[in-house]
Image (cartoon, rainbow, N blue to C red):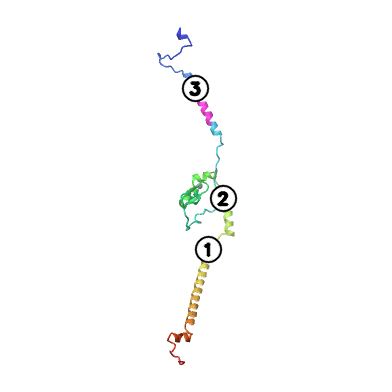
Amino acid sequence: MAESSNSVVGVDNTFRKKFDREEYLQRAREREEKESEKKSKSKSKGPPVQRKPLKHRDYQVDLESRLGKTQVVTPIAPLSQQAGYYCSVCECVVKDSANYLDHINGKKHQRALGMSMRVERASLEQVQQRFEVLKKRKDTGGLTEQDFDERILKQQQEEEERKRQRREKKKEKKREKAIEEEPEVDPDIATMMGFGGFGSSKK
Ligand SMILES: [Zn+2]
């Protein structure tokens, strides 16, 4: 009688446990569903980040402005005033220029700027345009090698000229000094000092 009753309390451990395959499959399915739901929820929180491809810098990297300067460094000073190169994007300090360049070209920094490390493939037109820009730059402000040579020559000539003038001035000063020293020892002072008599007939 007890076997057929539904009100049995307690655990019947006289038999080996039998797993209800169906029930567990069902549970597994439910769990999987829940998990996939969760996943899609957490994914849909933010749209996948679309990072732009790498772009070239449009500014000059400043590595030298603090070169040769003296600065007091304390460990409690803000990062930007610590010794080394400060990156304001990542708020970190890099100890030397080589590592600083590595840093600003690196993945972490580029990501902070919203760029992936992928490089955009340039089209033919883009390349042609770039050439055009560079050519124009050369035409207007750019210096050719010849310009540099001329500049150097001019500087050398100016330097020569300056040296010559300096030499001339020195010579002139010497001459003036010689003229000043030669004559006119005040006769009174000369007598006072006891050598007034030489060659003088006034005594
Ligand atoms: Zn950085």
Give the residue type that dot 2 points to. Answer: Val
Looking at the image, is mark 2 or mark 1 earlier in the sequence?
2
Label 1 secondary element: helix
Residue segment shown in magenta: 25-39
Q: Label 1 near label 2: C-beta < 8 Å?
A: no
**Could you give the CA–CA distance between mark 3 and mark 2, rounded to whole angstroms?**
61 Å
Q: What is the x, y in percent for residue 137?
A: 58, 57
| Residue 127, numbered circle | 2
Q: Quadrant of the C terminus?
A: bottom left
- The majority secondary structure of the magenta stretch comes to helix
Give the residue type that dot 1 points to. Answer: Phe
- The yes-or-no answer for disc 3 within 8 Å of ligand 1 is no
**Could you give the CA–CA distance between mark 2 and mark 1, rounded to whole angstroms?**
28 Å
Q: Residue furthest front?
A: 192
Q: Residue shown at 45%/8% (left/top)? A: 2
| Residue 148, numbered circle | 1
Q: Nearer the viewer, residue 41 or 94?
A: 94
